[in-house]
Image: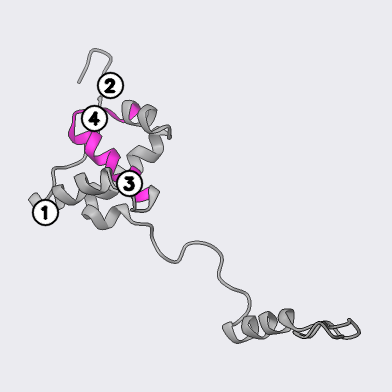
Amino acid sequence: MFGGGCWVVVLRARLGRDEGEQAVVHRLASARKAPKVVVERCRMVELSWGGWLVPQIADELRCSQKTVRRWLHRFNRCGLEGLEDLGGQGRKRRITEAERSRIVGLVKLTPPGRLEVQPSNEM
């Protein structure tokens, strides 16, 4: 506790559970062909391991401190799996897959009354 009665909590990424997890984080943090969001999240963990504080990480990666905190907490709780996006986000489809296929098929048809050009360039 400091003079004013306030607690200062420093959030850090926990160490990897084993050398394998640490190696994967290091590899993904500098990967060129991995999804950008995963690379950025691994970079957050890696910078935290390097002693960087949340505000410094946010400035370096040009994101909000809230974003850095979210991903460090998720990594601390779930490891590498915590750095992946959760499935099932967003609005659910309002039409079935069969209805969607029918609509796509109709869009590909020539509208009634419109001249159609055949492969031989005849109408």
Residue at horizontal 33%, vertical 39%? 69
Q: Position of residue 6 (x, y in %)?
A: 28, 21
Magenta-highlighted residues: 37-55
Q: Quick one: 101 or 63, which is closer to the camera? A: 101
Vertical placement of residue 55 versus 12, above or below: above
The first of marks 2 and 3 along the sequence is 2
In front: mark 3 or mark 4? 3
Q: In the displayed structure, does residue 62 sit left or right of residue 109?
A: left
Q: Quick one: 26 or 75, which is closer to the camera? A: 26
Q: Which residue is mark 1?
A: 20
The first of marks 1 and 4 along the sequence is 4
The reply to whether residue 19 is visible in this rendering is yes
The label shown at residue 39 is: 3
Q: Amino acid at mark 2?
A: Cys
Local SS, label 2: loop
Residue at horizontal 21%, vertical 40%? 13
Task: Judge whether residue 74 is colored magenta.
Answer: no
How many C-alpha atoms fall within 10 Å of the one at disc 4: few (<14), some, or many (≥20)? few
